[in-house]
Amino acid sequence: MTQPCSWPDDGVILYDGRCGLCSRWIRFVARRDRDRRFRFTPIQSPYGATLAKALGIDPADPQTNAVLLDGRALMRSDGAIAIVSRLPGWRFVGLARFVPRPLRDAVYRLIARNRYAVFGTNRQCDYGGEALAGRVLTEKPD
């Protein structure tokens, strides 16, 4: 799903900092993002909550991550495909766009609904620690 977006921050990934899967996801991206194109904001931060609300995501019950790319907000499978296909050596993942979106998003929603039960939760919001120092935004950048 794509939404037009006037948000000026390109390459920002919104994630659920309490979700074990989401925390692993941002580390997966950060390790492979050699050009440091992506930055991250947990939905539990002031910036993340503001961004979530602007995108129509409930900060109290987020059922999707989102990424801001080229003036657009991409969510669910569109967002995941867009992110991974921009990582070095992972361009082939872009072929997943040819799988019908309803099917891709059905799988995404199934995982999202069960992510806490399968992958666990963090006791507190995961801000990435030293590994993501300088890349996790908690306040809207100037």
Image: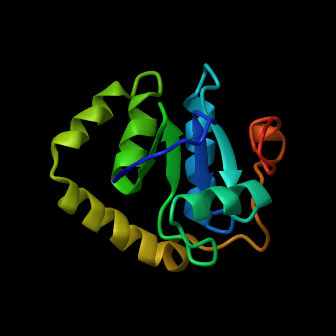
Q: How many marks?
A: 0
Q: Quadrant of the N terminus?
A: bottom left
Would you place residue 38 above or below residue 89 in this image? below
Q: Position of residue 118 (x, y in %)?
A: 49, 74
Q: In percent of the image, x 63 and y 44: which residue is there? A: 27
Q: Quadrant of the C terminus?
A: top right
Would you place residue 130 above or below residue 70 in this image? below
Q: In percent of the image, x 61 and y 67: which residue is there? A: 19
The answer to which image quadrant residue 39 occupies is top right
Q: In percent of the image, x 69 and y 63: which residue is there? A: 49
Q: Would you say 141 lies left or right of 52 here?
A: right
Q: Position of residue 57 (x, y in %)?
A: 53, 67
Would you place residue 56 above or below residue 72 in this image? below
Colour scheme in use: rainbow
Residue furthest out toward the front: 6
Would you place residue 119 above or below residue 46 in this image? below
70 and 65: which is toward the camera: 70
The answer to which image quadrant residue 23 occupies is bottom right
Q: In percent of the image, x 51 and y 45: which residue is there? A: 67
Q: Would you say 32 lies left or right of 131 here?
A: left
99 and 9: which is toward the camera: 9
Q: Position of residue 110 (x, y in %)?
A: 34, 72
